Image: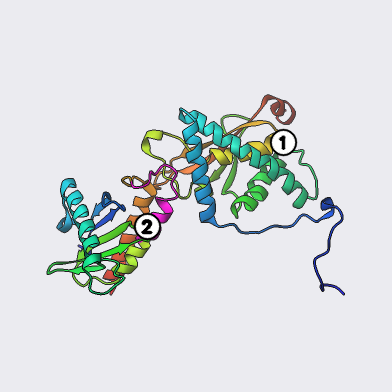
């Protein structure tokens, strides 16, 4: 009879279907864990640039795995081969899964051909963080920049990704922009 | 000109040191030394009151009523005390203290750049606190 008795046992763990998992995670739990990640890395480095790099590396690992998972779960194992395709994948699907909403905007850079920007009023990871004045332009969004870099690199579109605060007049808090600058190889193929 | 229902807000750590002080309006204003002195004075009084209480299980002074002002105090489970000096009879101060405690747990404790028991220097905490006090003021005037 269907539905009665214990759950179906799989002979091989690889045959088990990939569960959708918990859709929601406690924001407070994540905030404390992320805060500890930042504090731990602060003790290991001498300067701010290195701290940013460490956060990016942490995000890179997340990005690589998220790409594999989402390709399998959301897109039926189809591989993105177009630049705009992968960018809108990051802007909507990846953001939706990680942060619960699509990113605020995706723009093409005006000065350079190979630059794109994803903007957000306030990154989820930065919601409770106030950076002290003596740390200058440091942005914990470097973690998110790392995630984007991980996704792009592993999808075959190598890029340099950084997070910046952009002050907006009339607003007390600056908005955050993730700046994506594609590498030479991508430029030659996609920007002809 | 709005009457400030709240004169000042103090937050003291578990050893009695002042970690946050904000005054609203000229009535409650005092300089740094005075505010530090008041904080440690209140910390001691709060501790003594727990010993003096005739009923067992007393957790310290919640409310001090004087001729020109009221002082409401809230102590968290960890010993951090939030107290607000306000005009006599101002309503909903306990609620306000609980809200401020929530802001503290969000914007101070989740901030990786904040060192425990040190003075609070968090921009987001100041911003959100100002919003809460402003909303509270508007609600009070609306009565």
In this rendering, the answer to whether A45 lies above or below B39 is: above
Farthest residue, direction left: B67
> Residue beneath label 2, please?
B78
Residue sitting at 50 percent across and 50 percent down? A32
Q: Chain of mark 2?
A: B
Q: Of B27 and B46, which appears nearest the observer?
A: B46
Q: Of A135 and B17, which appears nearest the observer?
A: B17
Q: In the image, which residues are magenta?
A: B100-117
Q: Tag 2's secondary structure?
A: loop
Relative side of A110 to A150, left or right: left
Q: Position of residue B120 (x, y in %)?
A: 33, 47
Q: Nearer the viewer, mark 1 or mark 2?
A: 2
Q: Of B26 and B37, which appears nearest the observer?
A: B37
Tell me the quadrant of the picture where the N terminus of chain B can be found: bottom left
Residue A174 visible (yes or no): yes
Q: Tag 1's secondary structure?
A: helix
Q: Position of residue A176 (x, y in %)?
A: 50, 42
3D distance between C-alphas at marks 1 and 2: 46 Å
Relative side of A184 to B1, left or right: right
The stretch drawn in magenta includes residue B110? yes
Relative side of B71 to A147, left or right: left
Residue sitting at 47 percent across and 34 percent down? A43
Relative side of B120 to A38, left or right: left
> Residue beneath label 1, please?
A154
Marker disc for residue A34: none
């Amino acid at each position: 009879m269907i539905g009665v008795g214990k759950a179906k046992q799989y002979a091989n763990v690889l045959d088990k279907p990939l569960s959708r998992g918990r859709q929601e995670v406690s924001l407070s739990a994540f905030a404390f864990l992320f805060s500890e990640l930042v504090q731990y890395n602060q003790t290991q480095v001498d300067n701010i640039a290195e701290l940013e790099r460490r956060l990016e590396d942490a995000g890179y690992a997340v990005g690589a795995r998220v790409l594999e998972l989402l390709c399998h779960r959301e897109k039926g194992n189809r591989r993105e081969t177009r630049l705009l395709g992968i960018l809108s994948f990051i802007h909507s699907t990846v953001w939706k899964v990680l942060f619960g909403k699509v990113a605020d905007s995706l723009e093409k850079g005006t000065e350079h051909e190979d630059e794109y920007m994803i903007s957000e009023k306030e990154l989820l990871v930065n919601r409770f963080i106030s950076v002290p004045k003596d740390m200058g332009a440091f942005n914990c969004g470097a973690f998110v920049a790392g995630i984007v870099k991980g996704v792009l690199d592993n999808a075959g579109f190598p890029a340099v990704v950084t997070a910046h605060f952009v002050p907006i007049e009339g607003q007390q808090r600056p908005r955050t922009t993730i700046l994506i600058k594609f590498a030479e190889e991508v430029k030659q193929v996609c920007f002809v | 000109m709005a009457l400030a229902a709240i004169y000042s807000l103090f937050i003291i750590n578990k050893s009695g040191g002042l970690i946050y002080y904000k005054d609203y309006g000229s009535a409650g204003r005092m300089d740094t030394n005075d505010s530090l002195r008041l904080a440690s004075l209140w910390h001691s009084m709060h501790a003594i009151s727990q010993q003096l209480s005739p009923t067992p299980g007393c957790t310290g002074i919640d409310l001090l009523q004087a001729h020109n002002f009221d002082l409401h105090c809230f102590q968290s489970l960890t010993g951090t005390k939030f107290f607000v000096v306000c005009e006599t009879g101002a309503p909903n101060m306990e609620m306000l203290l609980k809200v401020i405690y929530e802001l503290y747990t969000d914007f101070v404790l989740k901030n990786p750049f904040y060192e425990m028991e040190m003075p609070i220097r968090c921009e987001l905490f100041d911003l959100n606190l100002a919003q809460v006090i402003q909303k509270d003021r508007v609600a009070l005037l609306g009565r």
